[in-house]
């Protein structure tokens, strides 16, 4: 029997690549978007889902379960970028980012868990970020929201493991997607104490994304995890230096690691 997979944020980027690849592998795939009627270039089914709206989430999950009778895999991919110095970034934008990147995925997990408990099986894959393993300058809020989702993944996995459900995180590094266009960018204020360095780093971030890996790499990694009987809790998918940076944080003194990051970001 083909597994039924729900992929949030599947209208573009990594989510679209994952959903398309799993469709090719003969999974029954449902992608989500706030406006699925505008997504016409995908081979899989689309349903309306807004991670900021619990009614929308429950309706989308119910639609999949009603159509297929089960739900085997949730890929919590929908997310949003945010940049800016902490001092200059509006608090409301910080809260909005956590609503999308942290509370939204939690609400989707809550919606699918009753069906997975009923089946006594299921996998939840939370897409986080390598940025969630370290506080990056001018991306502190994004790092914090993804890091928080990493910890929720650990906690939830322990709570549901005896019920036959696995909850894992997959942290991508820089991938060539359109994520930069959807970010909230705190303006470069003329009077800001961070004006010059923030402007330089905005350009640096965009260059990293443009030179990033093919999203199909992420799709293949997700496919492998779905097929793994006893998956790890955390996976990192990215370039060697991106993954090595996490190792360095574990082994270097805090001040040494901070110095490496500051040199990288020219601070």
Image (tube, rainbow, N blue to C red):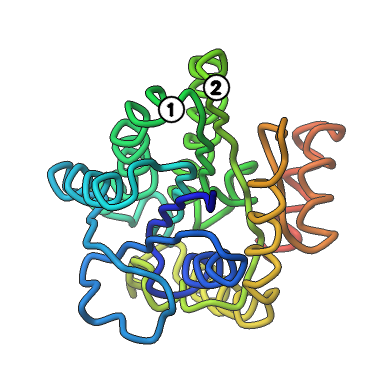
Residue identifier under label 1? 119
Q: Position of residue 91 (x, y in %)?
A: 25, 47
**Mark closer to the observer (1, 2):** 1
Mark 1, Cα crowd under 10 Å, few <14 / some 14-19 / many 20+, is some
Rendered location of residue 220, percent (x, y): 69, 63
Q: For mark 2, does the 10 Å Cα neighbourhood hold few (<14), some (14 to 19), or many (20 or more) residues?
A: some
Give the residue displayed 44% in from the left and 48% down from the top. Answer: 76
SS state under label 1:
helix
- Determine the residue positioned at 74% across, 63% down: 264
**Is 117 positioned to the left or the right of 174 in the image?**
left
Give the image location of residue 187, x and y in percent.
33, 71
The numbered disc on residue 129 is none
Looking at the rendering, in which quadrant would you find the C terminus? bottom right
Residue 59, horizontal then vertical, whole percent: 17, 47
Picture residue at 79% right of the left edge, 49% below the top: 245
Disc 1, disc 2: CB below 8 Å?
A: yes
- Which residue was labeled with disc 2? 164
Q: Residue furthest bottom?
A: 41
Q: Is residue 91 visible?
A: no
Q: Secondary structure at mark 2?
A: loop
Mark 1 or mark 2, earlier in chain: 1
Residue closer to the observer: 95 or 130: 130
Task: Using residue 210 as the reference point, say whether residue 12 is left or right of it.
Answer: left
Instruction: Report, in whole angstroms, how far the alpha carbon at label 1 lies from the one at label 2.
Output: 8 Å
Question: Which residue is at a point 48% across and 34% down the rendered structure image?
Answer: 148
- In this rendering, the answer to whether 250 lies above or below 194 is above
Tell me, yes or no, if residue 135 can be seen here: yes
| Nearest the eye: 152 or 204 | 152
């Amino acid at each position: 029997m083909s597994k039924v997979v729900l992929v949030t944020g599947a209208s573009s980027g990594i989510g679209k690549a994952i959903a398309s690849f799993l469709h090719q592998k003969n999974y029954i795939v449902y992608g989500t978007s706030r406006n699925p009627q505008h997504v016409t270039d995908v081979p899989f089914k689309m349903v309306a889902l807004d991670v900021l709206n619990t009614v929308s989430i429950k309706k989308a999950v119910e639609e999949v379960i009603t159509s297929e009778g089960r739900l085997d895999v949730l890929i919590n991919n929908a997310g949003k970028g945010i940049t800016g110095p902490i001092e200059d970034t509006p608090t409301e934008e910080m809260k909005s980012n956590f609503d999308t990147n942290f509370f939204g995925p939690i609400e989707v997990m809550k919606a699918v868990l009753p069906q997975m408990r009923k089946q006594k099986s299921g996998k939840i894959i939370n897409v986080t970020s390598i940025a969630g393993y370290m506080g990056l300058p001018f991306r502190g809020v994004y790092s914090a929201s993804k890091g928080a989702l990493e910890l929720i993944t650990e906690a939830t996995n322990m709570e549901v493991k005896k019920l036959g459900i696995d909850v894992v995180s997959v942290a991508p590094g820089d991938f060539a997607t359109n994520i930069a266009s959807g970010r909230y960018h705190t303006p470069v204020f003329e009077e800001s104490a961070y004006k010059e360095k923030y402007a330089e780093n905005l350009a640096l971030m965009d260059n990293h994304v443009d030179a990033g890996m093919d999203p199909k790499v992420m799709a293949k990694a997700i496919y492998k995890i779905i097929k793994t009987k006893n998956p790890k809790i955390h996976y990192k998918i990215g370039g060697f230096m991106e993954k090595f940076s996490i190792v360095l944080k574990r082994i270097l003194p805090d001040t040494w690691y901070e110095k490496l990051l500051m040199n990288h970001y020219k601070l």
